[in-house]
Image (cartoon, helix red, strand yellow):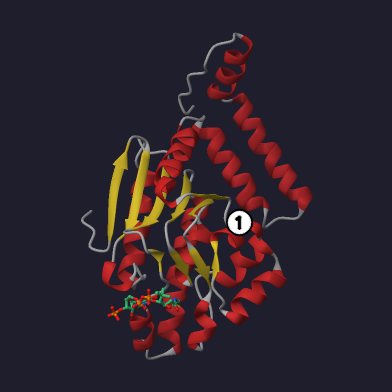
Amino acid sequence: MAYQNIVFERAGAVGVITVSRSTVLNALSAATTQEIGAALREVEADQALRVAIITGAGEKAFVAGADIGELRAMATATAARDLSERGHQIGFEIARMSKVVIAAINGFALGGGLELAMACDIRIAADTAQFGMPEITLGIMPGWGGTQRLTRLIGPGMAKLLTLTGERFGAAEALRIGLVERVVPAAELMTVARTLADQIAGRAPLAVAAIKQAVQRGMDMPLADACMYEAALFGEVVASEDGREGTSAFLEKRPPVFKGR
Ligand code: COA
């Protein structure tokens, strides 16, 4: 598929999606969101790809939020609600994917940009990145899962503090509150993200998918149900060809060769 608002590149087993709208700091128009969804579906469908990275073009912005021009033009509550629900679908698609999606946050991750990053499985940030949920300063509220994923990631008090003030904060604070998993020097961001992606891409695909789903779906279940779900997945993974290969390789003191079966 030809994209207008993103660049989609394959690098080995990694699909790199770069949001690229330089005149608006990579803000997400409806068309951009659709293209990100389409690229993620390409990654999921391509046997050769194991991991996706989402990043922003240039050094200044990951994604500076929803496109405020488009928001301003929303004439009705129904239209805005549709936009919100389409944004939610991307988050649900990422959650359902068997492959891992890493956000490489290279600059401003504000509003919808931070919501996109929060919907990813793992977040790596440049030490220069800036974060915030500024919707409240525009007289509106987060609408792409922000009130919910922020709460699940950092707890209700901090989620309310950040969404009610709209204050901006840096990468060290994002790391401290558990909003990102790693902070690295800006110049090394893509190398670190690629190394992590390659590492996960080299692991047994069934185990990667099962771990992701156990964490993802388990969060929405009571603990006992989630543990039963984990046990079912554990059964499948241990009995898989790759499960037998990995354990045999350890005992035979050789590197495993995983086949995704
Ligand atoms: N939607 C649409 N356009 C945006 C945008 C967004 N979310 N974020 C930035 N832009 C545009 C600006 O309007 C500006 O356009 P112009 O050159 O035609 O004037 C251009 O991108 C550059 O932004 P600018 O504000 O000049 O850069 P800055 O370095 O002074 O400030 C930010 C950077 C990110 C702090 C500032 O752009 C900003 O606050 N953006 C909005 C963030 C936001 O509220 N996001 C949530 C939306 S729900």
| Residue 235, x across and y down, in percent | 66, 31
| Residue 63, x across and y down, in percent | 40, 66
Q: Which residue is denoted by mark 1 in the rendering?
A: 175
Q: Nearer the viewer, residue 97 or 22?
A: 22
Position of residue 180 in the picture relative to residue 76 (left or right): right
Identify the amino acid type marked 1. Answer: Leu
Q: Residue at x 66, y 63 (%)?
A: 154
Q: Is residue 119 above or below residue 169?
A: above
Q: Residue at x 51, y 89 (%)?
A: 139
Q: Nearer the viewer, residue 146 or 166?
A: 166
Badge 1: how crowded within 10 Å, few (<14), some, or many (20+)? some
Q: Residue at x 64, y 11 (%)?
A: 251
Please identify the residue farthest to the bottom as the structure is shown. 75
Q: Residue at x 67, y 58 (%)?
A: 220
Position of residue 5 in the picture relative to residue 236 (left or right): left
Image quadrant assignment for residue 229: top right
Disc 1, SS: helix
